Image (cartoon, rainbow, N blue to C red):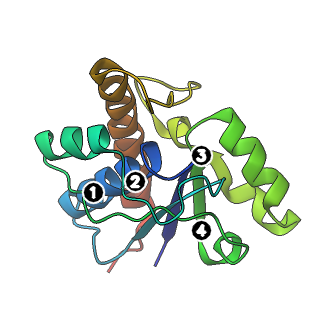
Amino acid sequence: MPSILLVCTANICRSPTAESVLRKVVEEAGLAHDVEVASAGTHDYQTGMPASPPAVALAKLRGYEIAGHAARRVQPGDFDRHDMILAMDQANLAHLIAMAPTRSRPKIELLLDYSERFPGQEVPDPYGGSERDYLRAFEMIEDGCRGVAGRLARERPAP
């Protein structure tokens, strides 16, 4: 079963949003029992804290649930446990590569490497920003997650 870790800085906005979105997208693609999804942060600023209220509210409006989330930091074991480690931006990518054992570095990518509408871009951190900032990040995350789910569907072993 493929396992995907979505990573941002503090694990309270972008990565829990991406975790929720990817869970729903893989469920809609009929892959829910075939994929494990988790999220974490590169820093421990908010460890144990819930997702940011604006992220929770926007997720709920769009049909996703992140209200029960508790932030956590990437742990050394995550690099062996997960098959794909998807960062929200270049700073997160650089932190992950610096933290990862050499053998795990090839599985670290940007989420938007899978995006159709935003390839090559970063998901901007909306923390402390406006509703519009959260909406922009959310749209980018949804697009990237649809791309990841498409890849998983194409690579799914035949029954």
Distance in Å between CA atoms under marks 1 and 2: 7 Å
Residue at the image point whose x is 50% and y is 31% from the top: 125
- Identify the element where label 2 is drawn: helix
Residue 102 quadrant? bottom right
Instruction: Characterize the local packing of mark 4: few (<14), some (14-19) or many (20 or more) Cα atoms within 10 angstroms.
Output: some
Q: Position of residue 123 (x, y in %)?
A: 50, 31
Image side of residue 139 versus residue 85, left or right: left
Q: Using the image as rendered, state which of residue 133 and residue 98 is in the foreground.
A: 133
Q: CA distance from mark 2 to mark 4?
A: 18 Å
Task: Point out the tag, 2 or 4, that comes first from the N-terminus.
Answer: 2
Badge 1 amino acid: Ile
Q: Secondary structure at mark 1?
A: loop
CB under 8 Å between callouts 3 and 2? no
Work out how far the residue at label 1 is from the one at label 4, CA to CA, in angstroms: 23 Å
Measured in 3D between alpha carbons, the distance from the residue under mark 3 to the one under mark 1, in whole angstroms, is 17 Å
Q: Marks 4 and 3, how far apart in space? A: 20 Å
- 13 up-or-down from 105: above or below: above
Under mark 2, the amino acid is Pro
Q: Give the labeled residue for mark 4.
A: 83
Amino acid at pointer 3: Thr
Residue to which mark 1 is pinned: 66
Dot placed on the residue nearer the N-terminal end, 1 or 4? 1
Tell which tag, 4 or 3, sits nearer the viewer.
3
State the SS at label 3. loop
Q: Mark 4 or mark 3, which has the lower sequence index?
A: 3
From the viewer's perspective, is the residue at label 2 or at label 4 nearer? 2
The local crowd at label 1, few if under 14, some if 14 to 19, many if 20 or more residues have their Cα within 10 Å, is many
Q: Residue at x 38, y 46 (%)?
A: 145
> Label 2 near label 1: C-beta < 8 Å?
yes
Whole-percent x, y for residue 67 in the image: 24, 58
Q: Residues within 10 Å of mark 3 (few under 14, many from 20)?
A: many
Q: Quickly name the residue at label 2.
A: 16
